[in-house]
Image (cartoon, rainbow, N blue to C red):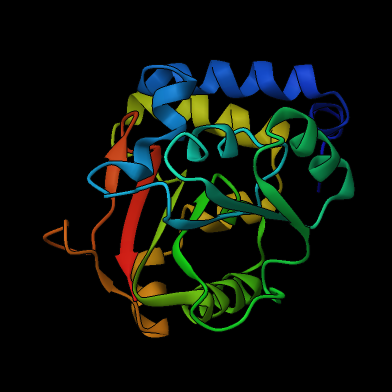
Amino acid sequence: MATIFRDLSYRYQWLYDAIARLAALSVGGEARFRQLALQNLTLGAETKVLDLCCGSGQTTQFLVQYSQDVTGLDASPRSLERARKNVPSAKYVEAFAESMPFGDGEFDLVHSSVAMHEMQPLQLRQIFQEVYRVLKPGGVFTLVDFHRPTNPVFWPGLAVFLWLFETETAWELIETDLQSLLAEVGFQPNNSEATQQPKLYAGGSIQVIQVQK
């Protein structure tokens, strides 16, 4: 169930941003955190990018620095209103991630930043199938999200954060093998990656995945 802290963080942008910046300190700050999943990718002005579950544009603001063709998708009208003000150079679409209003093979890159932990297990599979559909052949899907810590020192901080600001779906995600789920959908390791295993940061509490259609 959602907590009062979660409700407040979504209602007040400044509170959400403060929490995000604080959490990102574990990997060197918010700018680095928002671009972790973009490492080793070749992006240009013409790269067609989808910021999946873009929220208020926290990652969109960095994506538009790489590409002039960035679309943000989110199901929340309030978030999209904020995103349009925060990053007016991107395009925005209001829709659910599991049923995207795009044609097959439209995007070179689909990126998701700390959003998949909001989804139920069935939604995750549907979303990954949709991502696969809207990607061009050879297109890349990148995501950054929570992960079960490999260093026990990081467990208390992650646990408190999830208890205060997240729901049971976040706990389910850190027990989910996302790599296997993505492979079932049809994704392969990205060319720049030797394996499909995630890169882990902050004592294993954050995972970054890059896969290819």
**Residue 152, above or below 74:** above
Residue 146 vs residue 122: left or right? left
Residue drawn at point x = 28 percent, y = 53 percent: 198
Task: Work out whether residue 86 or residue 56 is closer to the camera in this orientation and state it.
Answer: 86
Rendering coords of residue 59 (x, y %): 55, 37
Rendering coords of residue 1 (x, y %): 81, 48
**Residue 121, above or below 49:** below
Task: Work out whether residue 150 or residue 16 is closer to the camera in this orientation and state it.
Answer: 16
Quarter of the image where the C terminus is located: bottom left
Residue drawn at point x = 35 percent, y = 48 percent: 44
* Quadrant in which residue 185 is drawn: bottom left
Rendering coords of residue 82 (x, y %): 81, 34
Residue drawn at point x = 48 percent, y = 79 percent: 105
**Residue 22, above or below 57:** above
Please count the marks in the image: 0
Residue drawn at point x = 60 percent, y = 24 percent: 20
Rendering coords of residue 42 (x, y %): 27, 50
Residue 6 vs residue 145: left or right? right
* Quadrant in which residue 94 is drawn: bottom right
Residue 78 vs residue 193: left or right? right
Residue 137 vs residue 155: left or right? left
**Residue 13, above or below 200:** above
